[in-house]
Amino acid sequence: MNPRRQAVIHQQQQRVSRKASNTDAYAFFNLLTSPELFDCVESLLPDHRERLFPPTETLSMFMAQALSADRSCQKAVNDMAVKQLLGGLKPCSTHTGGYCQARQRLPVEMVSTLLRSTGSMISAYSAKTWQWMGRPVRLVDGTTVSMPDTAANQAAYPQSRGQKPGLGFPICRLVGIVCLSSGAVLNAALGRFRGKGGDEQTLLRSMLDTLNAGDVLVGDAYYATYFLLCELQRRGIDGVFEQYGARRRSTDFRRGKRLGTRDHLISLEKPSKRPAWMSPVYYEQVPERLEIRELKVGGKILVTTLCCTNRTPKAELKGLFNSRWHIELDLRNLKTTMGLEMLSCKTPAMAVRELWIYLLAQI
């Protein structure tokens, strides 16, 4: 063979090898079929026929596609074809129709359950020494994610009222619970940016079963409400939150039982108006009064159910609340570094799948 021709072929092979080595679909596939995850993945697989893109293969490709700079389905299929050629297998078609249909068949429940199982597994393996005073810490926070401006996406996830029609993007609200010691996402809930049922309180309530007795939940001022604190206490969970605006303005450390400088216990009365989301039976079961601790540290007023100053000194609570920034950074990293800020799927059903795929892939 002509030496020049050999050189060209060698260069082409090198380019293909580099392209293949930068593709993570097979790495994800190996993880999903590893001994640690195999049984879990197998139990979640839907009934399916033997196809070119079975569920596990499709999930692996979708995860790699979400994290790729080029998130097109064409690139995902091309990468698979390259891998098959390098592996000595029969080359497959590079048409994207089969892969797109396979993505649509992936059950959202399969991906979300796998996320929760994987997050729980990683959290369980994290070192006990990384816990706070011997207790697991869970961080909660919310953010928003934009979607392509299609009629279907706008109907399911309408844009902000502050945006004029035709100038904004559909917005999905995301609330996540993260393990502080490992950084793993333990659960997430999705909702509309505006409209009933999409606020952060509602989304967090839908995930409370993720928490276990003995956990400590840390969050910002959106979560410091009477009913949430009561529910956490009922479950044996402690909460540490920043005081919300209206209550912060009326905080008077001269009232209640003084524990130290700008640190006291106060008793709150149950709100007389039952929230629309709460059943009358549940409302009647909520305690009439709730004792909480308010303290001012680091320029912020915190509210917590950790009322004993001997067990939880003020300085310890300050350090604990400062750790809340880890989830802020994690969400920011997902949105900017990993491309979660703007989804690519043009229908609500596929956009939701894509969002869960992102969360699973970051683990």
Image (cartoon, rainbow, N blue to C red):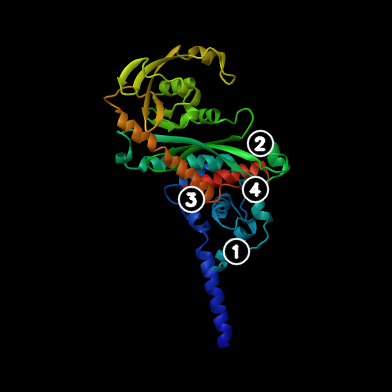
Q: CA distance from mark 1 to mark 3?
A: 20 Å
Q: Which mark is residue 345?
A: 4
Say which residue label 2 marks. Answer: 162
Element carrying mark 1: helix
Q: Which mark is residue 32?
A: 3
Q: Specify few, some or many for label 4: CA neighbours under 10 Å numbering under 14, 14-19, or 20 or more.
A: some
Tell me the distance, in whole angstroms, between the alpha carbons under discs 1 and 2. 45 Å
Nearer-the-camera pick, 281 or 336: 336
Q: What secondary structure is marked by label 3?
A: helix
Q: Residue at x 39, y 40 (%)?
A: 123
The relative height of residue 39 versus residue 265 in the rendered view (above or below) is below
| Amino acid at pointer 3 | Leu
Disc 4 secondary structure class: loop
Seen at 51% across and 12% down, the residue is 284
Q: Position of residue 302 (x, y in %)?
A: 40, 27
What's the amino acid at mark 4?
Cys
Does the CB distance between marks 4 and 2 fall below 8 Å? Answer: no
Which mark is in front, 3 or 2?
Answer: 2
Label 2 crowd bin: few (<14), some (14–19), many (20+), radius 10 Å? few
Q: Is residue 230 left or right of residue 165?
A: left
Front label number (4 vs 1): 4
- In 3D space, how far apart are the residues under numbered discs 3 and 2 (Cα atoms)? 42 Å
* Disc 4 to disc 1, C-alpha distance: 23 Å
Whole-percent x, y for residue 158 in the image: 67, 37
Q: Does residue 105 appear to the left or right of 248 in the view shown?
A: right
Residue 128: percent from left, percent from top: 31, 39
Residue that label 1 marks: 81
Mark 3 or 4, nearer chain start: 3
* Cβ–Cβ under 8 Å for marks 1 and 3: no
Q: Is residue 337 above or below residue 218?
A: below
Q: Is residue 338 visible?
A: yes
